[in-house]
Image (cartoon, helix red, strand yellow):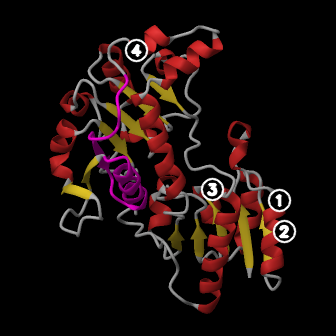
Amino acid sequence: MKVLIAIYYDRVFDVWNLPPVWVDELRRRFPQHTFVQALSDTELAREIPDADVLFGSQLSRPALAVAQRLRWVQSSAAGIRALLFPEFVGTDITLCNTKGLQSPFIAEHVMALALALARKLQVSIRRQAQHVWAQKEVSADPPSRALRGQVMGIVGLGDIGTRLARLAGGFDMRIVAVRRRPELPAPDGVDRVFGPGRLAELLAVSDVVAITAAHTNATRGLIGSRELGRMKSDAVLINVARGKIVNEPELTAALQAGTIAGAGLDVFAEEPLDPASPLWDLPNVIITPHTSGFNSEYWPNLINFFTENMKRFERGDPLMNVIDKQAGY
């Protein structure tokens, strides 16, 4: 069996390029199979015609057109929207993602951003770089506040959202959430679960709104000026999902106008974020460069996940995290 590994990005995102040592590790674990690493679209197109398995998040229409033996695509990411083009959706090739693999780290990142915004750490950090003692500025209105007793509104109660609810509960926050199937039992610690049609109710009562939903046709542009206008003026928005779930220009306008108090943003509509974006300079915004899921355990966890699914594929057993390509999740 030939396994083609295509976990690569351009130089800007080379932190996400799979180090060759992990390809060698998979060869050690599965000596009966052939593993080939592609590091460019050209190499992918050259190697995919006789590949049985694709491990990565890269698959173009031209590459699919010449993939004569492909039976399974294991995405190296949780987000798989880029793979769901009509030609691929119409095939019987199985698609899996890595949903849940980085959830603990992403949930912690949300709490880090929520804490930093609550304590106005972005002000202190910026003034530290200028050697300025910012005690008066940090203490000025609006004052720092505790998370205890505040309401965390979670938009998307999947694995990340469920873990986030657990962490936020540890800070004595009250938890409300929106998810696609509100009739399912609420996870421990979640006070109320709304359906998608009741997003406005969640926004109106939340002090921290965390976007952890998958990027689908239904969630694209989910948060715009109307939704931001329903939030409390002293509430903050945190997005660790996908940038296109939030209308970025309308969010920028709301932050500039003080419609909401601040934002913690790890994802953007176009990445890297344009150096000319006004978001960089807003004093009520914390920007992280799409790193909420990256950590020292990222590559070992990914390789172990693929190893387990590969063993299942060999045996003909059900795979983990199979995607309904029509539904998009």
Is residue 67 in view from this perspective?
Answer: no
Task: Give the image location of residue 79, x and y in percent.
Answer: 49, 55
| Residue 139 - label | 4
| Upstream in sequence: badge 3 or badge 1 | 1
Whether the residues at callouts 3 and 1 have beta carbons within 8 Å, the answer is no
Quadrant placement of the N terminus: bottom right
Amino acid at the residue labelled 2: Asp
Which region shows up in magenta? 144-172
Of residues 99 and 233, the one nearer the viewer is 233
Crowdedness near tag 4: few (<14), some (14–19) or many (≥20) residues, C-alpha within 10 Å: few
Whether the residues at callouts 3 and 2 have beta carbons within 8 Å, the answer is no
SS of the residue under disc 4: helix
| Upstream in sequence: badge 3 or badge 4 | 3
| Residue 24 - label | 2
Q: Which residue is mark 3?
A: 58
Task: Give the image location of residue 77, x and y in percent.
Answer: 56, 57
Task: State left or right for residue 132 relative to residue 160.
Answer: right
| Residue 20 - label | 1
C-alpha separation, residue under disc 4 versus residue under disc 1:
50 Å
Amino acid at the residue labelled 3: Gln
Residue at screen point 70% across, 59% down: 299
SS of the residue under disc 2: helix
Is residue 2 in view from this perspective?
Answer: yes
C-alpha separation, residue under disc 3 versus residue under disc 1:
17 Å
